[in-house]
Amino acid sequence: MSSDAGFGEPSDGEHVSAGDGKFGRYGGQYVPEALMPAIEELTDAYERYVLNNEDGFMDEFRRRIREFGGRPTPLQRADRLSERYDTEVYLKREDLLHGGAHKLNNALGQVLLAKYMGKERIIAETGAGQHGTATAMAAAHLDMPCEVYMGERDINRQRPNVFRMKINGSEVTPVTTGRGTLKEAISETMRDWATNVEDTHYVIGSVVGPHPFPRMVRDFQSLISEEAREQVIDRTGGLPDSVVACAGGGSNTMGTFHNFVGDEAVDLLAVEAGGSSLGVDAEEGVAPNSASLSTGSEGVLHGARTKLLQDGDGQIVESHSVSSGLDYAGVGPELAHLVDEGRVSPVNVDDDAALEGFHRLSQEEGIIPALETAHAFGYLHEHHDELGDVTVINVSGRGDKDLDTAIEETTKRDIPNAPDMSMFEGGLR
Amino acid sequence: MSDDGASDRVAAAFADGPAFVPYLAVGDPDYESSLAYVEALAEGGADVIELGLPFSEPIAEGPTIQNAVVRALESGMTPTRFFEFVEEVDVDVPLVCMTYYNLIYQYGDEQGPRPFVEKAASVGVAGFVVPDLPAEEAGPLREACDEFGLHLISIVAPTTDEDRLERLVEVSSGYLYVQARLGVTGASSSVSDRTGESLARLSDVDLPKAVGFGISSGEQAATIVEAGADGIIVGSALVDIVAEGHERGEPTEETAARLETKARELKRGALDGYGRRTPTPEGTSD
């Protein structure tokens, strides 16, 4: 893909269409009628600016994500992990992107698109706070007012990110409905959008929601695999045997996989949060995990038909994960489709394995990963002998935001490779 | 269920004068009280009643109805209980089921809306309002509704343009739910100026237009009907009464009586508004 083109397939200058937003049986546009005109307007803008580089949108996006965001991010060989697992492990360092996570790729793209569309206000939902933080940074960078909805429980789990958003000038509005996590924050942001749709753009944070969001967010995130594919070929002379990424809603997953989907010899592994156990407790309306690809069933949530954690009636159940960024009952429709097609393998590791992965990467590579990212390293540890000779793992974000949670969760469990936790008695402050 | 098809019963509700269409979430705060409340609305002059089947993610609802949904789910409301409710409730007006698509999609042994619609038809439901189902995705539900003789009532938003309106009318029957203002459901002290504008745009559509979102008093009902609405839809203002009764620990019959009084006020307002219309050369503005 040349750097002055849109994200459409190479087309010799032919117009690229945004399509209908269906991925096999998944996707679609299940939203209130009041939002449909805005979604049509967005689809049109996505097609013109993002897919066909109208008015040089993509040139400006690529320039800004380079200068403001710090792309390209490096592909780094993990020396000690490679030695430990006797396989070549390469880390795609999205944690080095400005803001400390892959989220800026999408946030900057969408806020810039909102500007091209003449919108005057940005809203976003956030779970771990990474997307909210990225959106707040992009909004400040592009001079747009921004309001971020965040579940009350997540606000308590992710204080540092709340402060960062506020320092960037965004409003952070707590969502108190339900269990106060990402699912409720998305619902509340959709309500704001339905009220203020005429001048407001909703920067959705993952490859979920109604068309064109799943495809558009994937496109912005596909910078990850656009670079990683080139970098790994450069370093090793060929394609990797496997590509591993954690999966919640699926934006880093799709971004990391997208340019490898056509390379059939490359195994694509989406690591979900197994939480404390798999399955759904319909009686209690909870799933002690966020493994919608591994255990979910087809349904309609937040604008798309996809795989969901739900009870037999279709009520959405509360998910759980030690990492709030993975704590969501749904998943992107394209990922659900790629799983059905057998192209992507859904796997999962539990909270304990993720915490082990967190400590291992911190100790052995000097990289403190986000707890979301740590799931991918939990999987690497358990299944390294199935991954072939060369593995690319996306380090989707850094773990500074998670230190409180990581210490708390490690202290109450028996994590074999954890440092002596007594030094943290009394917390971080 | 009367012998008339669903289509006739809904048409009849709008046939002479403005229709009063109240909404309550079924099971709020419990099954038995809900029966009394819905019957009180019928007693108070309801012409059609929208019964909310609670869904865990009600993205189109404001805080009032969100809380009602939480209370209803906590009281154990499910699609199966909902259908029992429709069979048991003793009212003589058409009942419309308002819910989100996932519950319709999941019901029964086969995927898709057909089993839900079949069951709804068998217990006497007259139609559906599905806030998260735009015309683009309505095909399968429309088909099932046609098969079992039920209505699919579409919501028309202030942002709906001519092209969308055309698509929307194509999949709609029964009546149009005209959203008076942008945003989510909720009572409001002033009625949007955009209502008249919206109704004017719909004047060529051959379906009754019922206006909802924000109506909470008889006077507002009058204003809306005077502006040309064929009916008024009131939800949050009634749910507020249920919530208040629940919080106070009020006996069910007292809350029911207050609902009936409010229903009468709204119905009277609608009739007053109808009387205030300037007669057109054809006699009425219908």
Image (spheres, grey):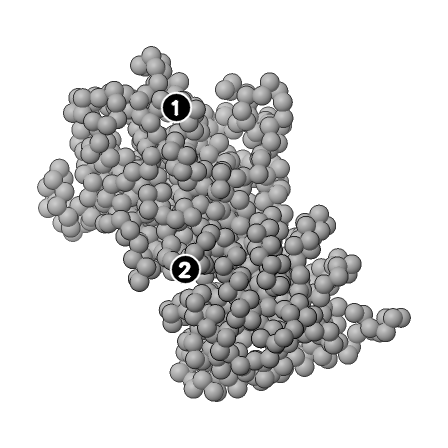
Q: Tag on residue B2? A: none
Q: Residue at x 44, y 32 (%)?
A: A221
In this rendering, would B119 be left or right of A281?
A: right
Residue A147 percent across, percent down from the top left: 48, 49
Residue occupying the point 55% across, 59% down: B130
On the question of residue A146 being in view, the answer is no
Q: Tell me the chain of label 2.
A: A
Q: Helix or strand or loop: what does disc 1 sit on?
A: loop
Q: Secondary structure at mark 2?
A: loop
- The residue drawn where x is 20% and y is 40% is A353
Task: Please rate how many residues cluster around mark 1, counting C-alpha atoms within 10 Å: few if below 14, some from 14 to 19, many from 20.
Answer: few
Question: Residue B160: x and y, percent?
Answer: 67, 52
Percent x, y of residue A376: 28, 35
Is the C terminus of chain B in the top left, top right, bottom left or bottom right quadrant? bottom right
Q: Residue shown at 44%/45% (left/top)? A: A306
Q: Which residue is mark 2?
A: A313
Where in the figure is residue A39, as x and y percent of width and height?
58, 45
The answer for how far apart the CA atoms under marks 2 and 1 are is 38 Å
Same subunit, tags 2 and 1: yes
Q: Judge whether residue A21 can be spotted in this image.
A: yes
Tag of residue A264: 1
**The furthest residue to the right:** B281
- Looking at the image, residue A255 sits to the left or right of residue B277; the answer is left
Name the outermost residue toward the top.
A237
